[in-house]
Amino acid sequence: MKISKEDVIHVAHLARLELDEAAVEKFSHQIGTILDYVDTLNRLDTTGVSPTSHAIFLTNAFREDEIKKHLDLELALSNAPEKDEGTFLVPRVIG
């Protein structure tokens, strides 16, 4: 499958990338090669093969939620470099 230089330039523009002519030529060839390989994969007979999102079976590794006592306010603020009236003081991020 061939991808045109115009397609590469269009996608680069959408991604806000500046590409020189050599890069456009290189990416056009590389993307074409990738699309040819994907086309080869699309021709495989996958009858009876379950769709998967991973090559191996995964199970949920999360633990069960447990209700616990919350951290004491004074303990939480004990190592804060700056605090005021029970809150952390942090540098202003948005001016």
Image (tube, rainbow, N blue to C red):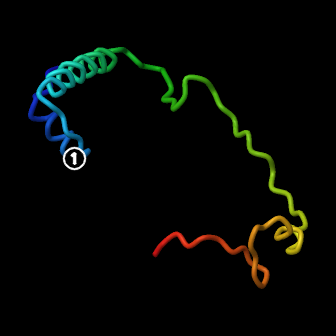
Report the front residue among 19 and 68.
Answer: 19
Residue lying at 85% horizontally and 58% vertically, measured from the top left: 66
Q: Is residue 5 above or below residue 72?
A: above
Residue 12 lies, in percent from the top left, at: 21, 39
Does 15 sit left or right of 76 as displayed? left
Residue 42 lies, in percent from the top left, at: 31, 20
Using the rendered view, name the quadrant where residue 62 is placed. top right
Report the front residue among 8 and 75.
Answer: 75
Q: Amino acid at mark 1?
A: Leu
Does 22 sit left or right of 16 as displayed? left
Residue lying at 14% horizontally and 31% vertically, measured from the top left: 20
Residue lying at 51% horizontally and 26% vertically, measured from the top left: 50
Using the rendered view, name the quadrant where residue 61 is placed. top right
Q: Is residue 33 above or below residue 17?
A: above
Mark 1 Cα shell of 10 Å, populated few (<14), some (14-19), many (≥20): few
Residue 16 lies, in percent from the top left, at: 24, 46
Identify residue for label 1.
Answer: 14
Give the number of callouts: 1
Does 33 sit left or right of 47 as displayed? left
Q: Is residue 81 above or below residue 44?
A: below
Q: Is residue 43 above or below residue 81?
A: above
Residue lying at 80% horizontally and 56% vertically, measured from the top left: 65
Report the front residue among 57 and 34.
Answer: 34
